[in-house]
Amino acid sequence: MEIGIDLVEHQDFIAKDQRFIEYVLSEEERQYFEKVSHPQRKIEYLASRFACKEAIVKCLKRKIDFKKVSILNDKNGVPYIQSDLNLDLRLSLSHTDHYSVAVVISLP
């Protein structure tokens, strides 16, 4: 079992350009992101997805293609990882007005 954690400040994501958004978000995540109308919620969404993917990198101890990993929510709003990594990864995600944190655990 491995674990990865990442914490980000939302202020660091205020002025991110389209290129950065396309680097971080999968196609499915981008579709959702474009529908979000509230600016603060867009920042929170982008920051939390970045934190999740960085936590995955730390857990796996290797780089991943962020665009091939989606952080989605089930019908109850619980986040989960969808990818072609063929690994059993579990995610916990939380945020405040100013920070997002993600923890990822790989199960055997």
Image (cartoon, rainbow, N blue to C red):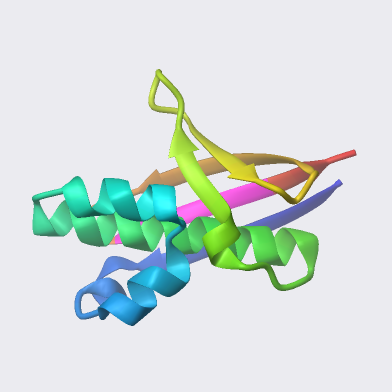
Residue at left offset 41%, top offset 67%? 8
- Is residue 57 left or right of 6 when viewed as pictured? right
Magenta highlight on residue 87: no
In this rendered view, identify the residue nearer to me: 84 or 92.
84
Residue 40 place in picture, x, y as percent: 15, 57
56 and 21: which one is in front?
A: 21
State the residue lying farthest toward the right: 108
**Location of residue 68 in the rendering, given as x and y in whole percent from the top left corner:** 59, 58
Q: Position of residue 103 (x, y in %)?
A: 60, 50
Q: Left of 30 or right of it: where is 17?
A: left
The residue segment tinted magenta is: 99-104
Does residue 103 lie above or below 51 as drawn? above
- Residue lying at the far left in this picture: please name it: 38
Taking the image as shown, residue 54 lies to the left or right of residue 26, namely: right
- How many numbered marks have been drawn onto this rendered protein structure? 0
Which residue is rendered at x = 39% and y = 50% of the image?
29
Q: Is residue 12 above or below residue 68?
A: below
- Camera-side residue of 99 and 70: 70
Residue 27 appears in the figure: yes
In the rendered image, the quadrant that contains the C terminus is top right
Q: Residue at x 40, y 19 (%)?
A: 76
The answer to which image quadrant residue 16 occupies is bottom left
Horizontally, residue 98 falls left or right of residue 71, namely: left
Name the magenta segment's main secondary structure.
strand
The answer to which of 73 and 104 lies nearer the viewer is: 73
Q: Is residue 74 above or below residue 65?
A: above
Residue at 71% x, 48% y is: 84
- Measured as percent of width and height from the top left, residue 75 is found at 40, 19
| Visible residue check, residue 96 | no
